[in-house]
Image: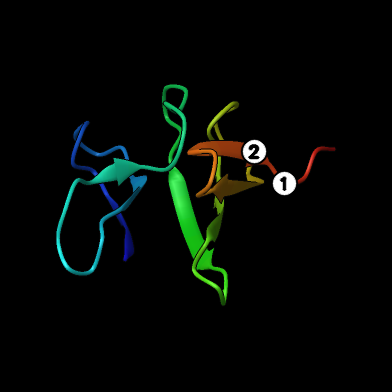
Amino acid sequence: MAYIADQDSYSVDELYSVPILGGAIEKLNQLPVAGGEVETFKISPDTENVAFKGDLETDEKFELYLSVKASHTYLPAVRK
């Protein structure tokens, strides 16, 4: 299960996942810049990846990212 919350820093929405049957919570995004946050996400049909939109690198410049479950890393999905 994935969700957006401000659980690490007040008023900074970030993306997390936790196994449905319980277990450790994992943050799926990098630390955002001041004013940045995750805005929305979609889980892939096979539940292996999560695509998300946020302004993580530059405040108010929203980009798409892909969190790859197998490598536990995020990748920029779109670069301009």
Q: Is 25 above or below relative to 22?
A: above
Residue at 20% from the left image edge and 33% from the top image edge = 8
- Can see residue 61? no
Q: Residue furthest bottom?
A: 45
The kind of secondary structure element at disc 1 is loop
Give the side of residue 19 with respect to residue 52, left or right: left
Q: Position of residue 11 (x, y in %)?
A: 25, 39
Residue at 46% from the left image edge and 30% from the top image edge = 30
Query: What mark, if any, has residue 75 been given in the picture?
Result: 2
Q: Residue furthest front?
A: 70
> Badge 1 is on which residue?
77
Q: Position of residue 57 (x, y in %)?
A: 58, 26
- Is the C-beta separation of discs 2 and 1 under 8 Å? yes
- The C terminus - image quarter: top right
The amino acid on which the numbered mark 1 sits, given as a three-letter code, is Ala
* Along the line of sight, the residue nearer the viewer: 19 or 2: 19
The amino acid on which the numbered mark 2 sits, given as a three-letter code, is Leu
Quadrant assignment, res 9 = top left
Q: Position of residue 52 (x, y in %)?
A: 55, 54
- Total marks shown come to 2
Residue at 45% from the left image edge and 38% from the top image edge = 29
Quadrant assignment, res 71 = top right
Give the side of residue 35 with respect to residue 61, left or right: left
Q: CA distance from mark 2 to mark 1?
A: 6 Å
Q: Residues within 10 Å of mark 2 (few under 14, many from 20)?
A: few
Q: Is 69 above or below relative to 49?
A: above
Q: Residue furthest left?
A: 22
Give the side of residue 77 with respect to residue 26, left or right: right
Residue at 42% from the left image edge and 43% from the top image edge = 28
